[in-house]
Amino acid sequence: MMEQDKKKEDLTLEESFEKLEELLSILENRDTTLETSFQTYQEGMKLIKSCNEKLDTVEKKMQIINEEGEYSDFQG
């Protein structure tokens, strides 16, 4: 199980995806209260935003590498 004290920004993408799966399970549970569902949804949206930012950063690094002519194997 993940450390609860890690910030969303400190999670790896894999850890973020695992956390999103946990949040989805909470949202799918019919016994989850509306308040808990709302808080879970907000947490999930913040996590998705963090994941998107990390993926954008990686994509920009890959573009820089490709523009410099290095690591041409990563073209997709």
Image (cartoon, rainbow, N blue to C red):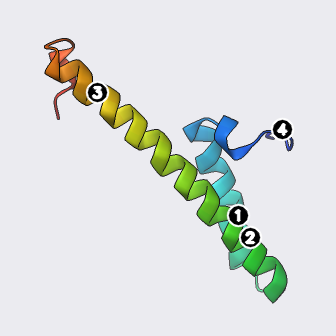
Query: Which quadrant of the view contains residue 63?
Result: top left
The circle drawn on residue 3 is 4
Tell me the kind of residue under disc 1.
Glu
Q: Quadrant of the C terminus?
A: top left
- Circles 3, 4 touching at the beta carbon (< 8 Å): no
- Circles 2, 1 touching at the beta carbon (< 8 Å): yes
Residue that extends furthest to the top in the rendered view of this protein: 70
Q: Secondary structure at mark 1?
A: helix
Q: Is residue 55 above or below residue 44?
A: above
Q: For the point 71% across and 59% down, which residue is it? A: 22
Q: Secondary structure at mark 2?
A: helix
The answer to which of marks 1 and 3 sits earlier in the sequence is 1
Tell me the kind of residue under disc 2.
Thr
The circle drawn on residue 43 is 1
Q: Is residue 53 above or below residue 36?
A: above
The answer to which of marks 2 and 4 sits earlier in the sequence is 4
Tell me the kind of residue under disc 3.
Met
Residue closer to the observer: 25 or 10: 10
Q: For the point 46% across and 50% down, which residue is it? A: 52
Q: Residues within 10 Å of mark 2 (few under 14, many from 20)?
A: some
Q: Quadrant of the N terminus?
A: top right
Q: For the point 62% across and 46% down, which residue is it? A: 16
Q: Which residue is mark 2?
A: 40
Q: Residues within 10 Å of mark 3 (few under 14, many from 20)?
A: some
Q: Position of residue 40 (x, y in %)?
A: 74, 70
